[in-house]
Every structure is written in C-alpha cells, then in structure tokens.
Amino acid sequence: MMRKQENITLIGMPGSGKSTIGVLLAKRLGYSFVDVDIIIQEKENRLLKEIIADEGDDGFLEIENRINKELSVSRSVIAPGGSVIYGKEAMEHLKEISIVVYLKLSYESLKERLGDLADRGVVLKNGMTLKDLYDERIPYYEKYADITIDENGLEAGDVVDELRAMMEERFGLHT
C-alpha cells in the first residue's frame, strides 16, 4: 500500500505555478514530475483546446476526471489541470495517493500572470469571466487541500522552500 506522503498533488488556478513549482519541488525531492494535462493530451492524441472544441466543456471534464482517477504513480509531484477539482472521483483518488497542496494566489496576481485563456485550455462557460471562475473554484480548492500555500509576493523557489518546511512539520516528510 502506497503511503500518502509518497506523492504531492498541486492544485490551483491556471497560472498559479503548478508546473513551475512542481518541477522545482520534484527536483529538490528527487521525485518525478507528472503534468496531467500532458498525459491527457497523449492518451487522447489531441491538444487540450482540441478536446474542448470536440467534446465541449463537460466532455473535457469527464476525460480529465477519468484520467486523474486512474493515475498510478509513486514518489511524484503531480500537477493536474485547474479544473480537476470538479471531478469528485479524481479528487478522492488524488487525496488517497498524495498530499494535496493548494497554491493560492490573489485574483489580481492571477490576472497579471494569465495571457490568453484559450491557449491554456481553461474551461470558461459562456458569459463567465475569469473573476467568476476564480470565485467559483476557490471553495473547491480549499475543501480538497491538505496544505494551503499563499504565493502572493513569493518567488517560485520561496514557495518550494515554504512547502518543504510545512511538509516536514505536518507529515514528517524529510526532504
């Protein structure tokens, strides 16, 4: 049976740094880095934006939920897409196999970081703004997180250092 501490899952809005921080953290821990968006694209043989165009938002979310709930990795930092939190089975599975870390960013900082949302494969329902999406997702991120890191004003390396210290303190993970 895999111990929960053997994996770390980073959740948060697109642009919150899941990939950047995930790669740095994986290097420092000697773990693998798993970008679930890339796994989805490989398994579906399509880009995220093509999947969304072909299947619609709901179809994409179903695919994302299925692939995340079937994820089988160890000693890995996992970076799923920002919408993973809509998949109940995916999140239950990720909480079973990993410590879930919410990378929290203010709306203002997020808006500064994000460019074209369509290129990022962000699921925005008709008429929905980025602020609407941000407000809708925050309660989900907070609900599923084992640890929350407030990234505002921190560089990626500082976030990794803070996260390592919290993991050691809370879970006895020596890194």
Image (cartoon, rainbow, N blue to C red):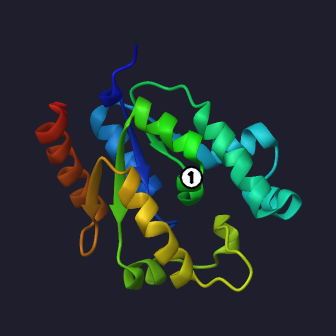
Residue 88: where, in percent of width, then height? 56, 46
Report if residue 16 is visible in the image: no
Residue 117: where, in percent of width, then height? 64, 75
**In the structure shown, which secondary structural element does the residue marked by tag 1 occupy?**
helix
Viewport quadrant of the N terminus: top left
Residue at label 1? 84
Viewport quadrant of the C terminus: top left
Give the residue furthest to the right. Answer: 54
Query: Which residue: 79% across, 54% down?
Result: 59
Q: Is residue 71 above or below residue 25?
A: above
Residue 24: where, in percent of width, then height? 35, 48
- Quadrant of res 96: top left
Q: Is residue 33 left or right of residue 162?
A: right
**Residue neighbourhood size for the residue with mark 1, other residues' Cα within 10 Å, grouped as few (<14), some (14–19), many (≥20):** many
Query: Which residue: 44% across, 24% down?
Result: 74
Query: Which residue: 42% across, 59% down?
Result: 141
Q: Is residue 47 left or right of residue 54?
A: left
Give the residue furthest to the top. Answer: 1
- Quadrant of res 150: bottom left
Amino acid beneath label 1: Val
Query: Which residue occupies the foreground of this view, 152 or 155?
Result: 152
